[in-house]
Amino acid sequence: MSDCIFSVRNLSVTLQTGLGLARVVDKISFSLQGGEILGLVGESGCGKSITAAALMGLVLSPQGLVTADQIKLGDKNLTQLDEASLRRVRGSEISMIFQEPLTALDPVFSVGSHLSTVIRRHRGENRRQALRSSVDMLERVGMADADRIMQSYPHQLSGGMRQRVMIAMAMACRPKVLIADEPTTALDVTTQAQVLTQLSELGQSFGTAILLITHDLGVVAQACDRALIMYCGRIVEEAPVKALFGAPTHPYTAGLLAAVPRISTGRAQRVQAIPGLVPHPAALSDGCHFANRCQRADTRCRTLIPNMRSVDGPTNSHLHACHHPLEHSCHAD
Amino acid sequence: MQTDSALLSVRELVVRYRVNGSRRELLTAVNGVSFDIHAGSIFGLVGESGSGKTSLAHSIMQLTLPTSGEVQFHGKNLAHMKGSDLKKMRRNIQLAFQDPLASLSPRRSIQQSLIEPLDHFRIDAPEQRRARACRALETVGLEADVLLRFPHELSGGQRQRVALARALVTEPELIIADESVSSMDVSVQARIIELILNLRQQLGIAFLFIAHDLAVIQQLADHVGVMYLGKMIEIAPADRLFRQAAHPYTRALLEAVPVPDPAHGKPVALQGEVPSALTPPAGCVFHTRCPRVEDRCRVLDPLSNQINESGEKRTSHHVKCHLWNP
């Protein structure tokens, strides 16, 4: 990968839960290039948000233990930085948007104060410059009435506007990497479409790589270039979106796609549920974690963890971790 | 008008709330909504947050008293019901609340929560009530061991099923399901959709299914109503609505749904924000965001027009938009 700006190797997170120690993220690896949007997809409880928190250095011991061979941002290895240096990197080179902007924004500070604090701290601008840059950022995320918004408090704004303020804050320092954790889940579809468009336009123009965490495959198809499918803390499939939707090879990916309701102009195609339940992270079986819900599973799946393997040969863009993947003619060679 | 054949019929329903306790400032949450639900059918109600869906549901149940208008169940006006009649009606219309973690008591086991309505309505002999609660859980696909657990011990999908079981346990004719699948993962959501279709088919239960996701509505509904700022701007049989939506807002809503297919173009974003319900726009409520706005839309509130030829009320397609005014 030529201009890879963020690369994660073998990231694992272990948490103390009521049922004992649970490895909620299990040796995941991926990399991001400037300007691209990578989707991280999975059901609730599969480890998406904890992955984001671990990457930002927000999982604290002794409740959580994070290990990684490498979390490389540009030329820095985040695993080797102390807290003070991490603090300089967070918000300026890597930043994050949370699912619920009303809890992420501080109710007693105005929007202007939120934005200018970030800018003054990381860009070293004085008060007046920072306020001007803040207005500029608000305009960039499509807020027509930026001067009034600057004076507003979070509770005075609608959900869509709050999320746009979050985006403006996160992108104010033109970070190399933005982690967006379910940024549109709390929004209505019409607002979601606006916010996703703005997010991808900003990412493009700043060259920021975006890790977009979502459970909505529709959002992945519309906004992402590539996607990772996560199940029980492991990545089970990685592919460019076209291949992922056109020719999914992991049975879990295929199951998820069959469960998504789609609007059609004719008769509605019935959705299909995946049998069984997601196991508790402290009670995972050996082998492939999806085996007990998978129709293709055999004894090998129940004992041996499948490794990530390339589906499309040396191109190495479509990978899966499955002993019995689904075959597609377009990948036959 | 064949309102007599409808199980539930809502006529010109208006719900207003006082804001900050003031008598002057009123928020109109539901503004003149009319529709029918027939026995054993599923009516899908869709709209963005703040469009009045939940207020409508609560006022049908008479939990929030309607400011004006009528709700008839089996042809009887619910507003005139009192005491035992109202109680009987409530047994036949059950509401599955939007957020089961908030509507199930955290201090009661699932068994206690399921038996409470049976005690209240004196259904079965007391010693048989546990068995009935157990059957209701089975119907929604949960094991009997859930009975002794507490809401916080269950997953979101399991809690939502408990909410449905609680609505089912009194054997109602109509269940109002308020965003029952909205916060779920697709694989769990698919199972609740299956469950609702089975309940309708096997027990003949009618549903008022409230959701903001049109794709989910298409899986379930026979009829669809679209709400915007308290008004029902379009009502049509489901197949017709998804084939030829008439109102610009319904079309925008359909276009904004992200399609799980990368070959499909990017969703077209509707401009602007939903106006405040405290100061709704004059004329058509949608005119501030409508791509096809004309002068008359800004001053004149459009009437509801039937736009298909159907003589039967069940299959007629109504829209509130000047574009369809002759």
Image (cartoon, grey):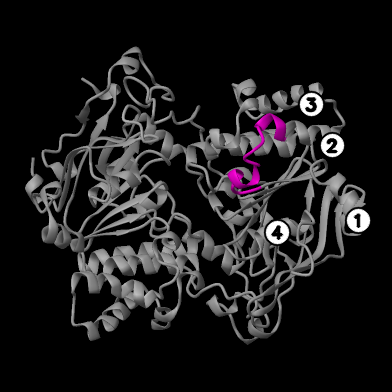
Res. A309 in view: yes
Q: Of marks 2 and 3, which one's residue comes earlier in the chain?
A: 2
Mark 3: few/some/many CA within 10 Å (<14, 14-19, 20+):
many
| Residue placed under numbered mark 4 in the picture | A318
| Residue placed under numbered mark 1 in the picture | A82
Q: Chain of mark 1?
A: A
Disc 2 from disc 3: Cα separation: 10 Å
**Do pointers 1 and 3 mark residues of a single chain?**
yes
Discs 1/4, front: 1
Q: Of marks 1 and 3, which one's residue comes earlier in the chain?
A: 1
Disc 4 from disc 3: Cα separation: 43 Å
Disc 1 from disc 3: Cα separation: 28 Å
Task: Tell me the amino acid under the disc marked 3.
Answer: Ala
Residue numbers of the magenta segment: A98-114
Give the residue drawn at x 62%, y 70%.
A325
Percent across and percent down for residue B113 are 35, 71
- Secondary structure under tag 1 reads loop
Marks 2 and 3: CB-CB under 8 Å? no
Mark 1: few/some/many CA within 10 Å (<14, 14-19, 20+):
few
| Residue placed under numbered mark 2 in the picture | A122
Q: Of marks 4 and 3, which one's residue comes earlier in the chain?
A: 3
Q: Is residue A185 left or right of residue B46?
A: right
Mark 4: few/some/many CA within 10 Å (<14, 14-19, 20+):
many
The quarter of the displayed image where residue B83 is located: bottom left
Task: Tell me the amino acid under the disc marked 1.
Answer: Asp
